[in-house]
Image: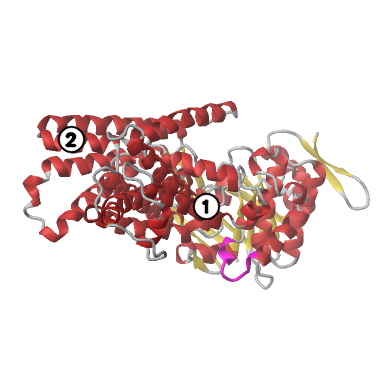
Amino acid sequence: MTAFALRRPIPLFALAALASVVASLCIGAFPVGLGQILSALGLSNEPLDDTTAAVLYAIRAPRVVAAFAVGAALAAGGAAMQSLFRNPLADPGLLGVSSGAALAAVSVIVLGERVMHIVPPELRPWSLPVAAFLGGLAATVVVYRIAAREGVTLVGTLLLAGIAINALTSAGIGMLVFVADDQQLRTLIFWTMGGFGSVTWVAITPALLILLISVPTLLPTAHLLDALALGEREAGHVGVDVERLKRRLVAQVALAVGAGVAISGIVGFVGLIAPHIVRLLLGPSHRTLLPAAALFGGAFLVLADALARTMVSPAELPIGVLTALVGGPFFLWLLASRAARGGL
Amino acid sequence: MLQAIGIEVRVRTRTLLRDVSLEVAPGEFVAIIGPNGAGKSTLLNALAGDRPLASGEILLDGRPFGQWSKPELARRRAVLPQHSAVAFDFTGLQIAMLGLLAYRGTLSERQMQALAEQALAETEALAFADRPYTVLSGGERQRIQLARVLAQCDADPSATPFLLLDEPITGLDLSHQHAALASARRRADRGLGVLAVLHDLNMAARYADRVGIVEDGRVTNLGPTRETLDPERLSRVFATPIVRIEAGSGTAFLSPG
């Protein structure tokens, strides 16, 4: 690492994230040139034909924006959860927060028609992210209640609670498979494997707004999250209102993960990989960890999505499958190295 | 003034402290001694505001704990717990600076770093302060944590906060044991109130103004150090013969007889 990167890492991460976004806008079944992207942004005079403009505005841009937002939310949410549980293994996917959100979202899709008529039409686009938030919130609260005793997290219990919640939610989703019709079934499967294939501006706007509020507002808590590493009691001694901070974190993580799930379904391991790699590069201080992990997670999902839609073109790989391919071995390596150090 | 007035601490059906009253005044060093499991740490935790009280109350400057905000409290008292595990690879300097969290906004980053480094130098921990806490030895970790609470006490030179230390010298070598208690002593001389749970009777004898003996959840004796550390009484409390050996020039040692 150069001294520049160590002292001012965030601009570097932002640059890399921007590069991934531009690359992903160019890549696809319909290739778009860099000059055309610049002229779409009004930064160049290169002529832009209607087809290219349509592909960029209506298809690729919402997809790339959604992938970036979800990746950033999962990574920042993962970092916040890891601080809350004082353990780098805490991941929204592994602990069942994502699947809790997905179960709630899928319930709305399958069962929602029966109650949707009482919801005013203008509020209906919000029903999915709100349900996902509530599902994620319920899962987070259950896991926290079970695994944390007087501020000390029992890691074994934590991961087992995550397994139990994941098992419960897949049972719930399994039940819904039986009552779903064909169209709903397709959506259901999409939700459990994750993807950005059906993203449109209209569909993602409510969730994007939630992410715009819930993710950047984690930043002012950075020093408090650092203090949590000392232990909950010790954090209280140096001036942190720990109970309030915990409530705030649980709500924000559930909002970020819930909104992410509402956009893309379950995409695992981003919340585990991104914060971990950033900690290895830049250290654990949350003032750099939160923004850098968010940028890293966003870029990671943008590139993963570009891969997912080009690898087996014209078909598409579910992005959750791709992230699990990378994240599974990563998680095993993390487990093995922590076990070798004498504990989880 | 930090006061416990008739406090009782219960965990489920077990009573850990009963009817304990104790006060620490600014400028004095109070040592708490007693057998294992007698309730010394519980008493310190209660005075730190970490234990729900079944009855009685804790007052800091005459105000009950519940009326203080967390940042206000952090400016008026610092606590060194017995065991401290730190999650993630924070460096010693980062941990010492966390002691100054309540002063963010009042102090600049540079001032906070200077205060932390000064405290780390005092505990002779500056040499390894840039290493991750998790790779340090037990004694080195203890000196980092001590530096964290010393920095917290020193952040506002006009204030005289209370310093609560739970077995601050356990795990330290002899010279660092003396250095740690001398640091606390200097702060008491500057006007801070110090309360330390200690196991070493000679250390208590040497550094404390007053000594409290905790037995079976009660403070059974509390008074000036020399009077309280009476060999006959100590022999009974610790159920082992203890004698005082005069070493001339006014010093004496307490030793198992």
* Residue nearest the viewer, comparing A13 with A86: A13
Residue density around tag 1, few if under 14, some if 14–19, many if 20 or more, within 10 Å:
some
| SS type, badge 2 | helix
Residue B19 in view here: no
Measuring 59% from the left and 45% from the top, which residue is drawn there? A281
Measuring 59% from the left and 71% from the top, which residue is drawn there? B106
Q: Residue B244: x, y in percent?
A: 82, 42
Residue A96 within the magenta-colored segment of the rendering: no
- In which quarter of the view is residue A148 placed? top left
Residue matched to label 2: A186
Magenta-tinted stretch: B101-109
- Residue type of the residue flagged with mark 1: Phe
- In which quarter of the view is residue A190 placed? top left
Q: Residue A150: give its label.
A: none
Q: Is residue A21 left or right of residue B6?
A: left
What whole-number distance in Å separates the C-alpha atoms at marks 1 and 2? 37 Å
Q: Residue B93: x, y in percent?
A: 67, 53
Q: Chain of mark 1?
A: A
Residue matched to label 1: A13
Q: How is the image coloured?
A: secondary structure
